[in-house]
Image (tube, grey):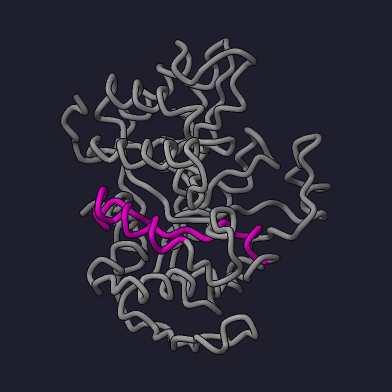
Amino acid sequence: MAGTFRPLTSLRPLTRFPAISTPHKFQHQRTKANMAKETRIVSPPYKTVDSHLHIWASPEEAVNKYPYSPGHEPTISGHVDFLLQCMEEAGVDGALIVQPINHMFDHSLVASVLKKHPSKFVGCCLANPAQDGTGIKQLEHLVQKDGFRAVRFNPYLWPSGEKMTNNIGKALFSKAGELGVPVGFMCMKGLSLHFSEIEELSSEFPSTVVILDHLGFCKPPLNGEEREAFSQLLKLSSFPQIYVKFSALFRLSRKPYPYEDLSDLLSQVISSYSARRIMWGSDFPFVIHECGYKKAKEAVLHIASQLSVSASDLEWIMGRTVKQLFEDS
């Protein structure tokens, strides 16, 4: 049984995304690849919130204040000022910042940005699965003192041979539920590898909200193994506390922008989860060298138009779902 879903609660006032106001105006950018079949993208009459992006220090900041984790030095720019510029140009009003591996468990940079832009950003910290249990206290501190509102489970940070369902993993997952923060799962090597762990944790701790990053890394299936993975993604919709990010489309699609081969996946995910449990995310700054930030947003609008997604459902996907998760509403 999936258990009973209980709304998010918190030990302190919740961070709010900005309220609804006049929409930004922008035009769909033309490219040679899509010029012939181009659909004019119209600015939506609601606030758009990006549910998945990263920031990291500039090289200068890394030297002076926010050092990179050894071996994880970034090769592209991910500075917050660059992000703000991209968001302004694309008409994106708020975002969930996911702690990057580049700074590992040093959350000081993201914490400083959350403090500086409290109405624009919400933070997702990175779970530390250290066997001594120090990650549990770290999670409490990051949520209660630094204002983070979600936590990411990266299964590849667990000790070799250990699963996210070990004692530490269950303690972290349970603590997240107590603190009222969702757990995001990053299944980069395939959902099938971690499906049973997610299912077990969600069954044992139904009050902990779950978010599956990037459709669980499911691509349009070409073989039985990939069809099984996507079937598992749809099966997890039976847990009412599980949400899905329709994010990092360039990682999922087998085609160039605007990633039209993802339309069938989105259609089935909407049918299984409903739009109220789906949220768009860009995966900035990695998307910059793919289609670009603005087009990351427009791709979803394009795919939705091909599916005739209702205006109400599109509003949920493009911002209302993530806003509802992190607002006191």
Specify the quadrant that holds the C terminus.
Answer: bottom left
Count the numbered circles shown: 0
Q: Which residues are magenta?
A: 262-288
Residue at 66%, 58% in the rendered image: 286
Q: Is residue 284 magenta?
A: yes
Q: Is residue 76 above or below residue 162?
A: below
Q: Main secondary structure of the magenta part?
A: helix
Q: Is residue 19 left or right of residue 145?
A: left
Residue at 63%, 47% in the rendered image: 109
**The furthest residue to the front:** 223
Viewer-side residue, 190 vs 323: 190
Residue 205 sits in quarter: top left
Viewer-side residue, 30 vs 307: 307
Residue at 43%, 70% in the rendered image: 93
Residue 103 visible here: yes
x and y percentages locating residue 163 in the rendered image: 51, 17
Residue 148 visible here: no
Residue at 34%, 31% in the rendered image: 179
Q: Is residue 66 left or right of residue 298?
A: right
Q: Is residue 95 above or below residue 141?
A: below
x and y percentages locating residue 44 in the rendered image: 35, 80
Specify the quadrant that holds the N terminus.
Answer: top left
Q: Is residue 217 above or below residue 86?
A: above
x and y percentages locating residue 48 in the rendered image: 39, 69
Q: Is residue 152 above or below residue 37?
A: above
x and y percentages locating residue 24 in the rendered image: 42, 83
Q: Is residue 261 magenta?
A: no
